[in-house]
Image (cartoon, grey):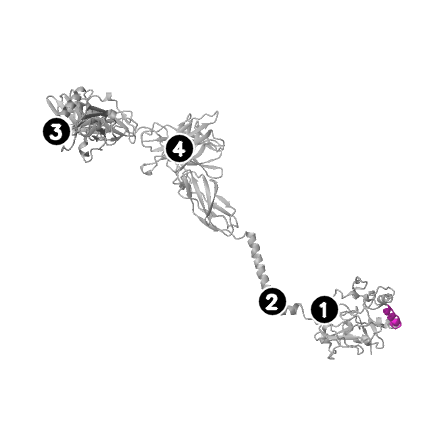
Amino acid sequence: MVSARLLQLVGVACLVAAFPADDGYLSHLVMTPQSPTLEIGTNFTATCTIINTDRITADDLCWRLPSIIIPEEHYRKINRTTLSVTFHVRNEKPEWLTCQPKTSYNLIGLEGKFIQGIFLRTGYRPAKPENLSCFAAQKNSMVSPVITCKWEVTGRQTTEVPTTYTLIVAYGSHTFNISTNATSAQLSLRTYPSFMQLNIWVEAQNALGTVSSKPLKAVEANCFVKPNPPSDVKAISEKEFPSSLLTTWNHSLTKYMSLIYQIRFCPRGSQIWNYVPLGDTDSPLESFRLQGLKPYTDYAIQLRCKNMGSGCGYWSDWSSNLTMRTPESAPSSKPDLWITVFESGGNKRQVMLISKDPEESNGKITGFDLSLLYHSNGSPELESIPVNWSEGDGRSSHVTELKEIFLSDKQFVKVVVTARNSVGTSRQAKLFIPPKSNGPTPVRDLKVWSHGGQLYLEWKLANNTHVSEYVIEWIEDSDSGSGGDGATWPNWQREHGSTRQTTIKGNLERFVCYNISVYAIRSGWIQTPARLQAFLEEGVLLKGPAVELKDNPGHNQVNLVWKEVPRHMRQGFITNYTIFYKHGDQTSAVTVANNTTSYTLKSLLGNTRYDVWIQASTVRGSVNGTTHSFTTMTYESFEGVVVGVSLGFLFLLLLVVLLCFYKREAIKENLWPQIPDPGESTIGNWSPDYPLKTDTPKENYLPSISILDVSAANQGFEEDKTSLSLKKDKYLSEEHSSGIGGSSCMSSPRQSVSDSDEGADMADATASPVQYSSVMASSVYKGQTPASQPQHGVFSRSESTQPLLDSEENPDMLLQDGGHHFQRFPRQSCFTQPDAADCGDFQQLDEEQTDFCACEEDPEPAAAPDGRSADAAGPPSSSYMPQLGGYRPQ
């Protein structure tokens, strides 16, 4: 280290002496060494010297890399004008190291003369090449003089310090080499040095050093020879040896060297090779017999060879595949017999017997021999059935339909099947089909799950149950089912009776649902299976369910129905359905179970349009079905009926009102004919002694009844008592009118008196107007003395179409006793005064007039609050009341 430092100082001194003392020199700094190549991971020292100036000293200098200023603890001051730096090289990329003043306060305009730098290249020393291998290939029937070698590079390299590799081959006094930057090379010799010692190695070299690989030394150069694969390889199938194939070949290089061979074989389609032991082929051979093969099986055969020398040589490539089939032999295993049962209705079962070829059929199966032994209530029945086919039958190699039979529920059968080929017959396969049973299965807690692209099964066996084997059956769950013409038969596999977990050994498809059954077989008897459905991999449904309305929408609810998505479009188990219904911008959802196909939406709005759709979901996602639109009713159904009936009634009522309005005159004439009011009619005077009343009574107003003074009445009665008794017999013997609107009980129709003197025509009495007669009481009752004017009786007449009263039709009855005056009082008149004595004669008179008023059933009027009778208190409630009146002839 000290000598290196001295040499560096000597070099700096020489450089200083070489430059003249001239201030015009470009730089006042000199650095050593110039453009070095540095090994990453080592320390590097550089020196900076000040020349031809006194402006700065070594104390004013600093060292700088592109990204940092090197700390001063790495500096070393050699003298007043020389400063060195030592640092650890870490960066793999090249960079500049500069020497310059710390500050430039007194170097304005001279900064360029006080900076100097060197370019640093970094890299790694070359590493020894490893795993060198070389060979000389066969060319035609000789060895090629071109040696091909390859090696592996170790260690690290940089682009600034590359490594060069040199391949060297030496034999005898000859040395050949070739350089490259790659990891392989080909070196051509003049002639391949067979049977000579040969050395081969590789040197790696860069700016930081050189290193050589471990040499390959061969006592004989043929150790580097790589021959071609054996040619003309053949395999011979011999009928007498169904489990062997005779293999033959040849090689053109055997005249230059001895070769050994390796043979491998496998059934066609398999990736597992079987190797013939090298001890059987370690001598020069040109044929070999492969033994222990399966009869009637295609085998792929390959060979390779190398130099026979021990510890050296390269194997040739494998020859191309040679395929050959071994001869046929009698089947060495029994057929795989199975059944599929369909319910055919009634008490019958449809059973299809199916079978696979024996696993070791050892030839082409040409048919089966089937025997059926039926057992029922009767004697056993045996049936033998041969099942044959030819080359043109197109039989599936997977499953063969043997026979379809029908069994009763209580019947069982023993099935025996053997398979045959052109050489022999297989062993028997037996199966017992039991009577129909719904008993429990011995297989418990069946589980199926998918993992790693396979379906795993696990189950348990019921206690105290012995099982000889299990049959695992699987079939695609399709919409059309199985069985019949073009049916897809199930696939199955057999497991040992001690098995509790297995995988399905078959080609299962993704997104397909499989019905999986596990049958326990006990001494050939089939037990009740355990069943599950499973997917190898679930996906999203291919379509969603289509929703429909079960019936017409209601006011606030609607019944929805939908069909299940077809099985082949599900691609997974449906976890649930979600019903979406929308009106306007508001969307609602209801989730229902996966086994639901109908639902009633409630709490809807009346007279509103809704869009509804069903979303079906699996574990992989959801799919929407088609959208259906509907509009709810304005009212409920019964409300609609009520509203309809009400509207119809109102419409009918409106029509009736309009009809009545337009036909009011006709209706009035038919229902309410116009009857003249006697109170407002023109009444003629019956007696000239009594003048007409000036005040005409108004409509619906009864003339007032005169109220008699008791004392005056009694006096009047006293005066007339004699005359009244004299006229009594005559009065009671005649029929008299009881007043206007009243009639006697014994009255009969008579001709009325008319002003037109046409009373003789009786036929037209009712058709022409008739005269009403009304006797009006005078203002002073008989017996009372008028104060200023005489008393007059007044009667009037009016035209009317009503039938005449009996007294009106016979006015002569009222006038036949012209010499006497007569007054008629209604029955109630005797109660107008409370004096019973004054009414005694009237009561007697009423009793004697029974024949006159027998039909009169007027109730007795109630007394008015002031003591008067109802007649005296005011008008009666009836529309007609007889009026008191008097008649006095002139």
The quadrant the C terminus occupies is: bottom right
Identify which residue, 270 or 102, lies in the foreground.
102
Tags 3 and 1 touching, CB below 8 Å: no
Magenta span of residues: 711-725
The reply to whether discs 4 and 3 touch (Cβ–Cβ < 8 Å) is no
Give residue 795's quadrant in the image.
Answer: bottom right
Q: Residue tagged by mark 2?
A: 661
Q: CA distance from mark 4 to mark 1?
A: 108 Å
- Compare marks 4 and 2 and give the one earlier in the sequence: 4
The residue identified by callout 1 is: 700
In the rendered structure, which amino acid carries the disc numbered 4? Ser
Q: Earlier in the sequence, mark 1 or mark 2?
A: 2
Mark 3 and mark 2 in contact? Answer it, CB < 8 Å.
no
Callout 3 crowding tier (Cα within 10 Å): few <14, some 14–19, many ≥20: few
- In percent of width and height, residue 336 lies at 38, 31
Amino acid bearing label 2: Phe
Residue 497 horizontal/vertical position (percent): 42, 26
Placement of 93 over or under 788, stated as above or below: above
Q: Is residue 483 visible?
A: no
Q: Is residue 433 left or right of residue 639?
A: left
State how far apart marks 3 and 2 are (Cα).
Answer: 144 Å
Is label 3 or label 1 in front? 3
Tag of residue 615? none
In the picture shown, does residue 542 fall above or below 360?
below
Q: Earlier in the sequence, mark 4 or mark 1?
A: 4
Residue 771, magenta (yes or no) = no
Is residue 174 placed above or below 677 in the rendered structure? above
How far apart in space, not on screen, are marks 1 and 2 (Cα)? 27 Å
Query: What amino acid is at disc 1?
Result: Asn
